[in-house]
Amino acid sequence: MDVVPDVDHHPIHDEVVPDVLDSPIPSGKQPVAVTKEVLPRLHLIDEQQQFSEQLSKFIADKWDLKEAGFNYNVAAVFGSQSTGKSTLLNRLFGTSFDVMNETARMQTTKGIWMSKGRDMKVLIMDVEGTDGRERGEDQDFERKSALFSVATSEVLIVNLWEHQVGLYNGANMGLLKTVFEVNLQLFGGNRGKEKTLLLFVIRDHVGATPLANLSNTLKADLERIWHGLSKPEGLEDCKITDYFDFMFTTLAHKLLQPEKFDSDVDKLRLRFTTPSDPNYVFQPQYSRRVPADGLHFYAGGIWDKIMTNKDLDLPTQQELLAQYRCDEIANSAFATFQEKIKEFRQPIESGNIVEDLGPKMQDIRGAAMKSFDKDASRYHAEVYKRKRTDMLTKANTMLEAYFLGQLKNLHKKAVNMFSTNLQNALRLEGSEFAVVVAASKKEVLDYFLQGAKAIKLEETEWTYDEELYQLEQGLQEFAIAQREKELNKMLTTLEKHLRKELDEPVGLALNNPGPGMWGRIITIYQRTVEDGEVLLQKKARTFDLDEKEQAELILNLRRQAWVLLTKKIQEESVDGMMLLKLRNRFEEKFRYDEHGLPRVWKPDDDIDTPFRKARDETVELVPLFAKINTLDPARGEKFELEATEDFDFDQSLKVLSETRQQELTTKFKRESDAFYLEAKRSVVATQAKVPYWVGVALIILGWNEFMAVITNPLYLMVVAMVGVPMVAMWYLDMLGLVETIAWKVYDQVYKFGMEKLREGMEKSRELQNQTHQQGHRQPQQYSSDSLQSRFSSSHSGKEEGEIEMSSLDKKSQ
């Protein structure tokens, strides 16, 4: 939506402005550039309080709303003079109401003006500002115009500055009180049928006080005014919400924050133009249900009723003077008060705790109230008391923000103190968790309460109960979380203890398989768990656990111990470990006798029967390992644990499946065959002995050779150098390794020699080629014989080289 630019009004160039304006108003000597057509406007009620007869014509001809029926809306704005009401309407609706020249603050809007919003079916009334110096103490028209606006508009925009919130006259509370009172007398019969939305637009909001606090202050003031009204008979119990709804918003400073101001106005415009907006103002319950072509009769009748009603009498001059002076005194004292409390804002917002904040706030507030009392107590007593209460309430409202901020910082520091104290105390040897938590909690709660009481001021309804409750809950949650950590540490330590107690005994039991193997393992488990329960109960007492929690921990301990046990059994039951256990048992039965001595098989020994017996006994161990037998030998009954979603006790008993049992049995039988063959070979080696006469024949026949070697030093040295190493290698069974190494060395030497030979032949060919080329460059006379001899020699050399290479290749092959 395009915005019509503001039009400055200079008093030295005043012109007579007719009631009907179809063109821009002249403003000073320099014309103002208007980018869009200025919308027609009507002086609905002039300074003499005369209602215009042109409303019907404007609705039909100028604003084109005659056929609109109920499809239109009416909004009005009122507030103190020179607060930018007209500027706000022009920005929101694209109207062209007169705005004040900022170099000369004076009244611009006189009476009530009406115009239509640009590109929207909304009629807007710009109401003369209240508390203007032009009318002075004559506030009769202010009350009548405000009552007229309330009675005819669906939405009444109450325009005020942020610093006026909490003031009585500055926030138009006196005017609203009169409007509410007369509205009840004139229109009280419409209770719950017709309501008006009061939209409070708080201008020049800098963000120091949140909108929620400002709106709460305004609501509290409005409720207090309503409860103090003199209500007609039958309406004593009526509520302000029976006739009015409230909405609050803020706008940034127009001069200091122009971009933010424009952005806020754009957002506010959506409330008037976009029905889907959650804050859309023109709701059905606010409609007056007056057709557009009958609005002039309805509005004229309302104004006549207001003009002829005697209940709109003005207050006494004394009260008016007291209101005016008390407001001035209060504003002056409050400005000093605001300046002094600024020093608390930055440190509190930074999360720091301000020392002696309570006494400082008490002194600053007391000084402000004392300054007010000194000058304002001379005026009308009732007005003075009311204004004093308003100022005290406003001061307490501003100080409450620092009170709450200090409480928040105390809360944070208390939590940090609790965490630090708890961590330091738990590091000490022999510390008990429950005792440490109780002592730390008492210390930080005492610290918080002492700080909270020190900043609570008299004559306030401040309370720190909610913050104290939140702190207690936070400490409790932190203590529970810390207890979980400490319990986890304890359980981790206990788990290491269980693993240490189970690993070695269970491994020994599994390495000595037999009918009583599982019974020994279950006994080891039960003994370990009993020791663990004693340690657990001893530690659990320091955590102040109830019986149910202790029982749950003990049950988890049993499950964890069982998991560790089954994990160890699975580690010992992998294929390699199982085959090792079976092989060891088979060797024990087959290769060693009943006395544990190794067997030396003789040719007449029966190998088949011991082999078959040892293998069968060993194979019988495979089904024993297949499933854990939970029979407890001490109690004579089977051991069992309750299953959970994450723990299946029955499934944990299975160690070897049927398939693995068959595979292990097959693999073991293949390995046992090797022991059988080894035993058979040892018997054959024993039987294959060399006859004694062969040795005698060798000695007789080789005596001369033996003596020749002995008597000849050269032969003896050669035999010693070759024979002794060969005998040693044969004895150490290294002949095969030496043979392999010898062949590798031979292969490398052969390849190296061939490479060198090829390089030599290549160099010879290159030398011959160079000689041949030189011969062509310098021709000489050779005889046919010499050429023939050279050719023959080179040819024969080539053939010899080729023959040698071919013979080497054959050797390599």
Image: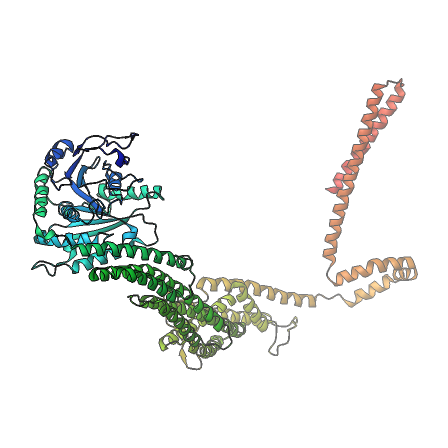
**Residue 635: image location, x then y, percent:** 42, 82
The residue positioned 17% from the left and 54% from the top of the image is: 317
Quadrant holding the N terminus: top left
Q: Position of residue 413 (x, y in %)?
A: 42, 65
Along the viewing direction, whichever of 37 and 663 lies nearer the viewer: 37
**Closest to the observer, 57 or 666:** 57
147 sits to left or right of 748: left
In the rendered view of the protein, which quadrant contains the C terminus?
A: top right
Residue 240 to residue 487: above or below: above
Structure colour scheme: rainbow
Residue 154 horizontal side relative to residue 683, left or right: left
Give the residue at the far front of this rendering: 378
- Residue drawn at (8%, 50%), measured in percent from left and top? 309
Q: Quadrant of residue 529?
A: bottom left
Quick check: 527 left or right of 85?
Answer: right
Residue 472 seen in this snapshot: yes
Q: Nearer the viewer, residue 563 or 363?
A: 363
Where is residue 160 drawn, in percent x and y? 26, 49
Residue 653 visible to an observer of this rendering:
no
Residue 346 falls in image quadrant: bottom left
Count of marks, rendered view: 0
Could you tell me residue 512's position as x and y percent? 54, 74
State whether residue 350 is above or below residue 599. Answer: above
Q: Observer-nearest residue: 28 or 119?
A: 28
